[in-house]
Image: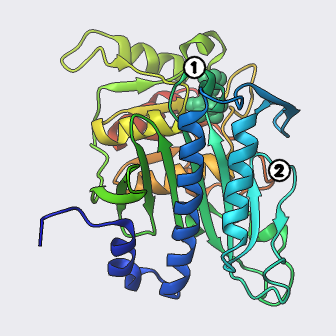
């Protein structure tokens, strides 16, 4: 047999025994995400060619202009997850409230809730920079047979049963974890198949890349300012490189492979930071920890933060463990 990489489908079959719940359920979840990823990938790749660029004219709950691809991606992921008869509720950055899925589940027998950022970094689309989809999956905690409730979504990040992202970059990759390590699959667009290209991804414990929007430097807390100056100092392993794409998934993906830290601090103009806890920080934190990295709000692990609102924002520092430890050391001086 030729020594070709495993397909995503083969990988799921091979590893579904390790999924703590019914193996078939995991397969359905990942297959739904895989289908939507291929559809969105096709649209993202041709965005420059058809009239799908530019704002859709609406704004989402975050008050951000909704790019048409945001709206399309949101629809595709919701449709694909709804049609599989596995999900009882969906929350999305593009939806003010969560969606109760009962079209296929009138008896409320489905056991999973999915939270998504359908197209993160979408403001980059018009300038041909990578964007991504982020997803976070939980088992419902309210009784099966009853309608899904907000508490099913407001769970600790540590309760996630799966999480991952699709990065629509120079190649399209699906990277996910079910709590047994992180694996990356690259799409062969010619045949629409994802192949295992990055097995057991590990965050290097150290790195030489820091990712932050330095345009906000004057607004950052002093501890963060001091850490950024530390990154820029002349020393044996510094100055570090500054790399910031403006697309969380792309910055995270590069840093997970090469080593580095991504920072979106709180500031005097955004007192909770910008990134959303439930469908950006928690899934990325789950991946980071599963890959041996670290994710914190500057003081506490992201996965231990108790959610109170669907779209709440938190400060976010994520990446190589020793780099996040050092950041926390600087922040702790000003507690
Ligand atoms: P800023 C995209 O809107 C996003 O949520 C992340 O993908 C990205 O890292 C960040 O915001 C960019 O925000 O304020 O630096 O433009």
Mark 1 C-beta closer than 8 Å to ligand 1: no
Whether tag 2 and tag 1 are in contact, CB under 8 A, the answer is no
Percent across and percent down for residue 102 are 84, 78
What colour scheme does the image use?
Answer: rainbow
**In the picture shown, does residue 232 fall above or below 189?**
above
Helix, strand or loop at label 1? It is helix
Per the image, the residue denoted by label 2 is 95
Q: Is residue 335 visible?
A: no
Percent across and percent down for residue 8 are 38, 66
Quadrant containing the C terminus in the rendered view: top right
Q: Quadrant of residue 313?
A: top right
Q: Is residue 294 left or right of residue 309?
A: left
Helix, strand or loop at label 2? It is loop
Q: Quadrant of residue 252?
A: top left
Q: Is residue 280 visible?
A: yes
Quadrant containing the N terminus in the rendered view: bottom left
Per the image, the residue denoted by label 1 is 127
Q: Which of 65/222 is in front? A: 65
Percent across and percent down for residue 108 are 81, 85
How many residues crowd around disc 1 within 10 Å: few (fewer than 14), some, or many (20 or more)? few
Q: CA distance from mark 2 to mark 1?
A: 25 Å
| Number of dots carrying numbers | 2
Residue at left offset 66%, top offset 76%: 84
**In the picture shown, does residue 17 fall above or below 124?**
below
Residue at left offset 78%, top offset 27%: 55
Q: Is residue 38 left or right of residue 171?
A: right
Classify the position of ligand 1 by quadrant: top left, top right, bottom left or bottom right: top right
**Of the residues under marks 2 and 1, which one precedes in the sequence?**
2
Percent across and percent down for residue 276 are 69, 43
Q: Is residue 38 left or right of residue 279?
A: left
Residue at left offset 37%, top offset 36%: 255
Q: Nearer the viewer, mark 2 or mark 1?
A: 1
């Amino acid at each position: 047999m030729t020594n070709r990489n495993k397909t995503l489908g083969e990988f799921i079959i091979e590893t579904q025994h390790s999924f703590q719940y019914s193996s078939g359920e995991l397969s359905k979840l990942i297959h739904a995400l895989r289908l939507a990823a291929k559809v969105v990938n096709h649209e993202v790749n041709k965005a420059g060619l058809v009239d799908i660029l530019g704002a859709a004219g609406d704004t989402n709950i975050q008050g951000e202009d909704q790019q048409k691809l945001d709206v399309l991606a949101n629809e595709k992921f919701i449709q694909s997850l709804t049609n599989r008869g596995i999900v009882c509720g969906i929350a999305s950055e593009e939806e003010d409230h969560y969606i109760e899925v009962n079209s296929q589940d009138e008896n409320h027998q489905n056991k999973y809730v999915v939270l998504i950022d359908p197209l993160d970094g979408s403001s980059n689309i018009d300038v041909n920079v990578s964007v991504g989809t982020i997803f976070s999956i939980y088992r419902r905690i309210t009784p099966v047979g009853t309608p899904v409730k907000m508490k099913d979504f407001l769970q600790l990040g540590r309760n996630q049963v799966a999480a991952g992202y699709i990065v629509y970059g120079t190649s399209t990759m699906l990277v996910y974890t079910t709590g047994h390590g992180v694996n990356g699959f690259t799409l062969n667009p010619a045949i629409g198949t994802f192949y295992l290209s990055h097995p057991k991804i590990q965050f290097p414990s150290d790195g030489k890349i820091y990712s932050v929007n330095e345009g906000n430097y004057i607004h950052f807390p002093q501890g963060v300012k001091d850490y950024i100056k530390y990154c820029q100092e002349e020393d044996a392993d510094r100055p570090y490189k500054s790399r910031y794409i403006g697309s969380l998934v792309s910055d995270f993906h590069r840093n997970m492979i090469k080593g580095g830290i991504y920072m979106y601090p709180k500031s005097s103009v955004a007192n909770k930071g910008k990134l959303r806890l439930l469908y950006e920080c928690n899934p990325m934190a789950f991946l980071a920890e599963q890959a041996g990295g670290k994710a914190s709000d500057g003081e506490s692990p992201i996965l231990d933060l108790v959610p109170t609102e669907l779209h709440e924002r938190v400060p976010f520092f994520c990446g190589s463990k020793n780099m996040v430890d050092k950041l926390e050391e600087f922040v702790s001086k000003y507690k």
